[in-house]
Image: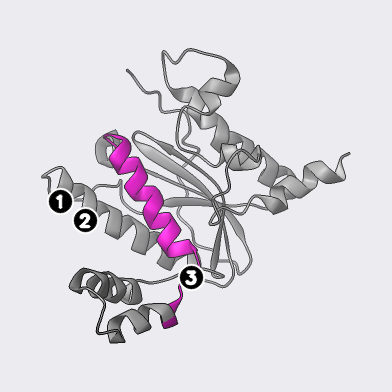
Amino acid sequence: MVYNIFYMPAKNIVKDYSAEGYYHVYNRGVNKRRIFIDDQDYKTFLSYLKIYLCPQNADDLKNILGNPSATPKQKDEALKGLSLNNFNNKVDLNAYNLMPNHFHFLLQQKEERHMQSFLQSLMTRYSMYFNRRHNRVGGLFEGTYKAVLVLSDEQLLYVTRYIHRNSLGVIGLKGSLDEMLHSQPSSYPNYLNEIHQEWVKPNYVLSFFSKAK
C-alpha cells in the first residue's frame, strides 16, 4: 500500500516557547522513511506516551524496590520507572495521529521548555527501541521536530480536524469516511467517546462544540 505525504505545512522550528501555549507538532522519518513498520511499533510508541504523560506514583515504585518479596524483574521495572522523565501536569496531549512515516500532535505545555523536554525524551527513547528492534543505526527522525504555535480558537479547531483527517492520506484506502478516519492510531476515537486514553486531553477542544448547542 502506498502512503501519501498528506500534511507538511511550511517548515517551522519552534523559537517562541510560550507558557500555556498550544502547538501543532509534527515530524517524519529521515528521507521520508517509515517510523512504524507494524502494530508492535505503534503500540510501543503509544505505551511511551502513556508512561510519560500519566501520573507517576513514585511512592509505589520505591516501595517495590524496598520490598524483599518483589522479584528482580519487578525491581528492575520500578527502577526504570523512577529514572524516566515524567511530564504529567507539564504537557497535555490534546490530539494525535500516527502515520507510517510521520506523526502529528496537538500539545499544550504548562511552562516554557516542557514541550521540548517531552519531545526529546519521547523521540530519543523510541529511536533507540526502533533501531534495536529493526537492526538499524543512525537517526530515525528528520532532524528537529517542527511546531506551529496556535494563535486562535479557530486555528485550534482547524488543527485538531487536520490532525485526525491525516488518516485519509493513505492512498488506496477504501471504506466509509468513518472507517478511514479510524484506519490509523489516533485520538479520534477519544473525541467520539469510543475509548478513554487517560493521557489524551480532548475536553478543551470538545467544549467549543458543547457551547454551540
The secondary structure type at the circle numbered 1 is helix
Mark 1 to mark 2: distance in Å?
6 Å
| Residue 171 on image: x %, y % | 41, 17
Disc marking residue 132: 1
The amino acid type of the residue labelled 2 equals Met
Place of residue 103 in the rendered image (x, y in percent of width and height, measured from the top left): 42, 42
| The C terminus sits in image quarter | top right
Q: Which residues are magenta?
A: 36-59
In reply to whether residue 114 is colored magenta, the answer given is no
CA neighbours of label 1 inside 10 A, class few (<14), some (14 to 19), many (20+): few
Numbered circle sitting on residue 128: 2
Tell me which residue sits at (26%, 34%) in the image.
Answer: 37
Question: At x 47% / y 49%, what residue is drawn?
Answer: 12
Scheme of colours in the image = one colour
Nearest the eye: 202 or 156: 202
Mark 3 or mark 1: name the one nearer the start of the chain: 3
> What is the distance, in whole Å, between disc 3 and disc 2 at their CAs?
23 Å
Q: Position of residue 114 (x, y in %)?
A: 49, 69
Rendered image quadrant of residue 21:
bottom right
Q: Are marks 1 and 2 in contact (CB under 8 Å)?
A: yes
Secondary-structure class at tag 2: helix
Asked if residue 47 is among those painted magenta in the image, a careful observer would answer yes
Residue 179's disc number = none
